[in-house]
Image (cartoon, rainbow, N blue to C red):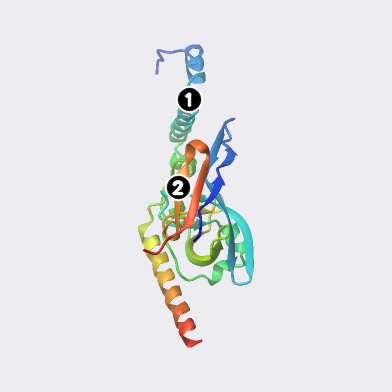
Amino acid sequence: MESNISTHQLLPALQVLPRADKLRIVLFLISQMAQEEGIEPSFFTQNYLDWKRYDASSAANTLLKMLAEDKHNQELKHDSC
Amino acid sequence: MIHAERFAYRQISDGFGGINFFPYLPLTLSYRNHSIETSGLLDTGASVNVMPYQIGLQLGARWEQQNTSVQLAGNLANLPAYGLLITASVAQFPPVRLAFAWTRAENVPLILGQVNFFIEFDVCFFRTQKSFEIHPKQDI
């Protein structure tokens, strides 16, 4: 594919980008290259991009049940003393 | 009356030549006869507390003896996790029971999330001052 912008033009433009944008570009390039190699891109990028997503409502419910049982057991133990 | 305790944000290199600041809370975790001093990332966006594999081992927990499986989200969803009840002490406050999702993952920090850290403690963030305040919940 023919490019309208040369590497000489691109690099100075990249250098002045904010760090977060630089990181996005790195991840974009990794994703592109992985696709070209037939590798699932998320194999490389998901650890960085997704580790902060913890919307785990079923886990939250399970932990709340454990805490309720623990509290109940503590009260039973206290009552029997 | 228990007053709030103030802590400083921790300075961490981001690996790209920059410095970031994160609210890590020093605390002592106890499980049966083991105690360790560590610190947890206060993460209001996390549904649950998350404990990395190594911390659980340091506390003497046995992975193969756990039987309450929990399903995490994001990339942690691909790894098994179990519920683990821990006693946690923060500053001079009375100890509390915290429930953690003990994940097989090792590349995550100890995370203090909505269930149940933020049920037990109120936290005020002062990001511009790079500090936060914490105090136990108050029964109304």
Q: Position of residue B61 (x, y in %)?
A: 58, 67
**Image quadrant occupied by the C terminus of chain B:** bottom left
Residue at position x 63%, y 71% in the image: B33
Q: Position of residue A10 (x, y in %)?
A: 47, 16
Residue A15 left/right relative to A4: right
Pick the residue in front: A70 or A18: A70
> Which of the 4 image quarters holds residue A72?
bottom left
**Disc 1, SS:** loop
User: Residue tagged by mark 2?
Assistant: B124
Count neighbours of disc 1 (C-alpha within 10 A) and say few if under 14, some if 14 to 19, many if 20 or more. few
Tell me: residue B4, above or below residue B16. below
Residue B13 left/right relative to B72: right
Q: Nearer the viewer, mark 1 or mark 2?
A: 2
User: Residue tagged by mark 1?
Assistant: A18
- Whether labels 1 and 2 share one chain: no
Residue at position x 45%, y 61% in the image: B120
Residue A3 left/right relative to B15: left
**Disc 2, SS:** strand
Count neighbours of disc 2 (C-alpha within 10 A) and say few if under 14, some if 14 to 19, many if 20 or more. few
Chain letter belonging to callout 2 = B
Pick the residue in front: B138 or B35: B138
- Tell me, yes or no, if residue B140 can be seen here: yes
Residue at position x 45%, y 51% in the image: B123
The amino acid at mark 1 is Pro
- Tell me, yes or no, if residue A51 can be seen here: no
- Tell me, yes or no, whether the two marked residues, 1 and 2, touch with CB atoms within 8 Å: no
Cα gap from disc 1 to disc 2, whole angstroms: 29 Å
